[in-house]
Image (spheres, coloured by chain):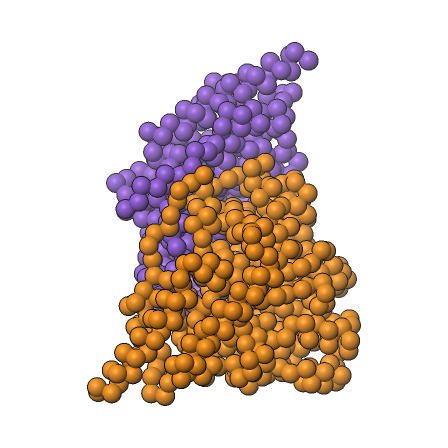
Chain colours: A purple, B orange
């Protein structure tokens, strides 16, 4: 085994990419493998199997494809929607807006329920919409990275199953898979869209999607051709099945290094000494700690309801009179990388901290202590600088 | 600086992924950077600039997007073709077939000139097709990885400019960029589609496309919306311009580690002690060496015309009576990874060797000696095994 240690670096606590382990980075630096070789095939097959474990599905079909998380929206839009079909989108922020843009680019007729900034769509709003009109898909952002609002995936899955059982439930879990509990089968979720660089603990560059058999049946039954090539599940399904069964197949060259890094991270997540349940609890504990630090500093959270607040990241309002540029660079000077807002109208009013993966599950690293201390010092300095003017 | 050395491994001499340098792998193992940080922005900006240098363009617009090379076909198809428009595809193998499938998935009306196995489309065939019908795009695979046939990019660019100056010339350079000479501006090439894992010397996972200003004008003038979201240049163009100008912008999270690895490889390619011209010559020399080794063993090449034979890879017919399974595993036993055919009807009749990047430009590694020796020994052993039966 290697004694590889990653380079000293600023602590990366944005809501993705995140801090990753030495083992994951070392896997990313392994000499490239031939994508059809006996050395690579079981690595890819294991990734498919372990991805299922993370979201508690027995029959969901993972698609692991080189790309950003955004590519998952194209996969949903190109494979599951035919032009003119209706989609209900529960919009809780910037990423809801973008998902809607993507769906419309493929001809979907998108109805949105737009939650106010800092809020999630309520069960009553969802029920009303489902009673008014049939929808092919009901899509939502589990954690909208722009607001740290957590939608209630269980409630959404169950409500759709009760009132509109033919609809497919689409969960955008880019900022929630492996940091928030997701029970794909039990909650009736049909598609989970994710990416490698957040709770899943690898570098960015891998689009990770899991589709239920019900979703694949919808694909089978579509009348118009799939409206894409690279994002077409018809192209990828035989590839994923082949690799899982231990044989190679070719559609496009998989990102072999990143798949190996993802394999290492998935192994650390699913076969470690802490269970997935304990992992989720550690994320809840970390979120509580960051929220209480914000409260101690007199700062308010963007999410208005504690029950609808993410556990893998926190979005915090700046005090009156301070902008993002007053705070974020001061943390960077202290070697702690956080980030500003990205919600369109409010982006200079708040900042965001990520607390996922090793930062959370390896408390001996002291990451959260560093974040909280740097936040406190930076804030005091920023406020003092304003008084001096 | 690091003393990182990659793990001992089998010599990877398939036509991509290829052997990469320790420096490139170490960059891939750098702790992830925030994609909007001042640390990352110049790395991305440099990659855009150096990509231009490799293909000799001053005004071409690079797009560096997480994805496989295949995603470049979607970019061409979704941005530059409107449903029902005509594309002429010069088909010299498997990758021509797939590019045609992709164009058709986006509604293109594709006419193909299909070269026989081992041949490229001729100038006379191209001229005749261009005189018969106007085409929005003329697309070709520069090196078809399935056959090692090299198309004459300069001839194609000049012929289209002469007979059909409004057409856009699309070069699929996944298996040619940085191993074959490509003069984008001088030859009148409008789009180059490539990927990170072949001549460009990085791990797979990055779709690399360069579009001329003429191509971007065609995008501006399209009537129907761009038929994709993740592959939409309208989404990516402001991002690429922002990063090149030193400011962050967000559409989808870039694969920060792979971009850093690509930066390292591009630096080694464009700022090394050997020029690009010398690099191309070293690839020509390596190809000659492999071809002459094949001739010494009494083996015939798949490409029938030496002028239409790739310099970054070689496709060689197996002797009568031997299949891929008789040869490739014997080289693997000798720690040399080559691969079989993938051309649909002929895939068990030939094998392929890649000779790109460090394997070629660092002769002190002795890679080609190992390949030639392993090929000779494996072939003798395979032939002997048949006699014994």
Q: Is residue B317 visible?
A: no
Numbered disc total: 0
- Residue sitting at 55 percent across and 80 percent down? B306
Q: Quadrant of the N terminus of chain B?
A: top left
Say whether residue A90 is left or right of residue B170: left
- Residue sitting at 40 percent across and 39 percent down? A6
Q: Quick check: A6 above or below B23?
A: above
The quarter of the picture where residue A245 lies is bottom left
Q: Is residue B149 visible?
A: yes
Residue A274 versus residue A192: which sits nearer the camera?
A: A274
- Residue sitting at 47 percent across and 66 percent down? B355
Residue A371 versus residue B332: which sits nearer the camera?
A: B332
| Rendered location of residue A236, percent (x, y) | 46, 66
> Residue farthest to the left?
B388
Q: Quadrant of the C terminus of chain B?
A: bottom left
The quarter of the picture where residue B295 lies is bottom left
The quarter of the picture where residue B112 lies is bottom right
Residue B363 versus residue A210: which sits nearer the camera?
A: B363
Say whether residue B307 is left or right of residue A214: right
- Residue sitting at 58 percent across and 32 percent down? A340
């Amino acid at each position: 085994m290697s004694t590889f240690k990653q380079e000293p670096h600023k602590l990366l606590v944005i809501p993705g990419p995140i801090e990753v382990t030495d083992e994951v980075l070392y896997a990313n630096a392994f000499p490239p493998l031939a994508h059809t070789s006996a050395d690579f095939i079981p690595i890819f097959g294991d990734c498919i199997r372990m991805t299922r474990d993370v979201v508690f599905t027995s029959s969901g079909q993972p698609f692991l494809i080189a790309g950003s998380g955004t590519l998952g929206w194209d996969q949903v839009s190109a494979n599951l929607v035919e032009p003119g079909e209706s989609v209900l989108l529960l919009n809780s922020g910037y990423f809801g807006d973008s998902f809607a843009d993507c769906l419309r680019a493929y001809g979907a007729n998108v109805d949105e329920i737009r939650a106010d900034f800092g809020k999630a769509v309520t069960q009553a709003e969802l029920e009303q919409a489902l009673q008014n009109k049939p929808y092919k898909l009901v899509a939502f952002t589990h954690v909208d990275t722009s607001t740290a609002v957590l939608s209630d995936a269980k409630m959404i899955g169950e409500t759709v199953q009760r009132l509109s059982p033919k609809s497919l439930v689409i969960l955008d879990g880019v900022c929630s898979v492996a940091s928030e509990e997701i029970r794909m089968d039990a909650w009736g979720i049909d598609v989970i869209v994710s990416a490698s660089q957040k709770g899943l603990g690898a570098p960015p560059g891998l689009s990770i999607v899991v589709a239920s058999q019900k979703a694949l049946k919808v694909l089978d039954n579509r009348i118009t051709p799939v409206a894409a090539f690279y994002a077409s599940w018809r192209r990828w399904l035989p590839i994923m099945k082949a690799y899982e069964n231990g044989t190679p197949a070719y559609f496009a060259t998989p990102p072999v290094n990143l798949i190996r890094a993802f394999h290492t991270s998935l192994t650390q997540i699913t076969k470690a000494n802490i269970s997935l349940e304990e992992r989720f609890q550690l994320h809840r504990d970390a979120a509580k700690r960051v929220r209480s630090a914000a409260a101690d500093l007199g700062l308010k959270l963007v999410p208005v309801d504690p029950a609808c607040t993410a556990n893998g990241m926190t979005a915090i309002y700046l005090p009156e009179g301070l902008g993002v540029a007053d705070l974020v660079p001061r943390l960077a000077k202290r070697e702690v990388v956080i980030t500003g807002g990205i919600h369109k109208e409010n982006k200079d009013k708040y900042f965001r901290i990520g607390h996922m993966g090793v930062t959370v599950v390896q408390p001996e690293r002291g990451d959260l202590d560093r974040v909280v201390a740097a936040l406190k010092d930076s804030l005091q300095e920023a406020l003092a600088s304003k008084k001096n003017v």
